[in-house]
Image (spheres, helix red, strand yellow):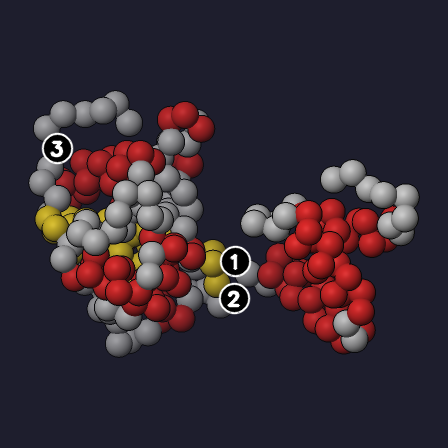
Amino acid sequence: MRRSPATAPTIARLIDAFHRLPGIGPKSAQRLAYHVLRAPRSEAEDLAAALLDVKNSTKLCQICQNITDADPCELCLDPQRTVATICVVEEPLDVAAIERAGVHRGRYHVLHGAISPMDGVGPDDLRVRELLSRLGDPEVEEVILAMNPNLEGEATAGYLSRVIATMGVRITRIAHGLPVGADVEYADERTLRAALTHRVDVEPEQNSDGS
Ligand SMILES: [Zn+2]
């Protein structure tokens, strides 16, 4: 961002840092920076500590690959949640969205992305191997594919359904109610609840799209 000489370099640096965050335009970045400047020192210290903590203290759950402070994560350790159903999502934020909908009482698996040949992202770049090794557990009965309704989500769900087809688990897909282009992360609770409740069985595909 172009900086006016009237802005002190330290403030300009903070404005730039906020501006790099997703969804923050130049105006918002300025507002946030001046807010921090005027806020009590303790608020700035809390913010700085929270930023560093999230980088220093979080890790991936070795079971579901979600971002967690404790490994295994709380969801994987919860005895109230069935191991029979694994809901596979693209991103950690999708877990939070589906949890808010409150309809899935099974486990999760976070892929950390979706297959995208255009961006050079293939199955080996995602947490697919970890998912397949979980499916070796005879207690797992169903895999719910909760990918986003876009090209990458379709490619990922298609690939997963092909490789899982031989493993003797039921494969379902959230379908109804989730409009094309509406990412899981942003879907409202009612829509997600309907999408999970009315999930459909995935028939093994005959053709291969080469992914
Ligand atoms: Zn976990």
Earlier in the chain: of badge 1 and badge 2, it is: 1
Q: Residues within 10 Å of mark 3 (few under 14, many from 20)?
A: few
Q: Does residue 147 show up?
A: yes
- Residue 69's label in the rendered image is 2
Question: Is 22 drawn above or below residue 153 in the view shown?
Answer: below
Q: Is residue 101 above or below residue 180?
A: below
Q: Amino acid at mark 3?
A: Glu
Give the quadrant of the N terminus.
Answer: top right
Question: Going by the picture, which residue comes out furthest to the top?
Answer: 210
Residue for point 81% across, 49% down: 12
Measuring from the top left, give residue 100's x and y in whole percent: 34, 68
Residue ID for mark 1: 59
**Residue drawn at the location 34% of the way across and 53% of the way down:** 184
Q: CB atoms at circles 3 and 2 under 8 Å apart?
A: no
Q: CA distance from mark 1 to mark 3?
A: 35 Å
Looking at the image, residue 37 sits to the left or right of residue 90; the answer is right
Residue sitting at 38 percent across and 26 percent down?
Answer: 117
**Amino acid type of the residue tagged 1 in the rendering:** Lys
Dot 2 alpha-carbon crowd within 10 angstroms: few under 14, some 14 to 19, many 20 or more: some
Under tag 1, what secondary structure?
A: strand
166 shown above or below 46:
above
Q: How many dots with numbers?
A: 3
Q: Secondary structure at mark 3?
A: loop
The residue at the point 73 percent across, 54 percent down is 30
Mark carried by residue 205: 3
Image marks 1 and 2: residues in contact by CB distance under 8 Å: yes
